[in-house]
Amino acid sequence: MDVRVAKCILLTRVLTADGMITENERVLLDKTMARAGLSEAERKLVGDLEGFQDAEAAVRVLPEAERRELLGELVEAASADGRLSPLEASTLKALTAALAL
């Protein structure tokens, strides 16, 4: 799986962990996908959370510094709506373990 897509899938997983996505979170996701240069087909994969397990595996092989940077971005994104829900916190904790951090 393309690492750019994988990172955006993980971001989407965090943003949707509480069962909803706010307008601020949607804007953040759209900007992230645009910055990553994702095609419409790749954006659909991200929106559908297709390949979540593959996304974890694709990111897990990155250098530790890059995984830590991504985790920091995910934490920041989870707080984009001004709060960190228990479900978002739980998702972040699971991703931290999945990324071997």
Image: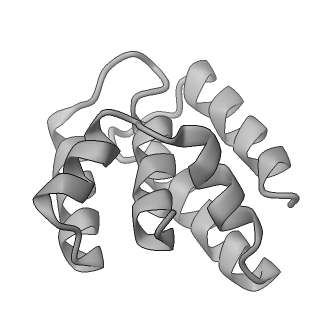
Instruction: Say above or below: 36 vs 81.
Output: below
Q: How is the image coloured?
A: one colour
Image coordinates of residue 101 in percent, x first then y, are 86, 61
Count of numbered circles in the view: 0
Residue at (66% x, 41% y) in the render: 92
Q: Is residue 31 left or right of residue 17?
A: left
The quarter holding residue 72 reads bottom right
Instruction: Say above or below: 75 vs 51.
Output: below
Instruction: Say above or below: 69 vs 72.
Output: below
Image coordinates of residue 80 in percent, x first then y, are 36, 47
Q: Is residue 56 left or right of residue 16?
A: right
Residue at (22% x, 77% y) in the render: 37
Q: Is residue 35 left or right of residue 62?
A: left
Instruction: Say above or below: 38 vs 9.
Output: below
Residue at (12% x, 57% y) in the render: 40
Taking depth in this image into account, of 33 and 76 the one nearest to the observer is 33
Image coordinates of residue 24 in percent, x first then y, are 20, 45
Image coordinates of residue 46 in percent, x first then y, are 33, 46
The quarter holding residue 20 reads top left
Residue at (52% x, 64% y) in the render: 73
Q: Is residue 29 left or right of residue 100?
A: left
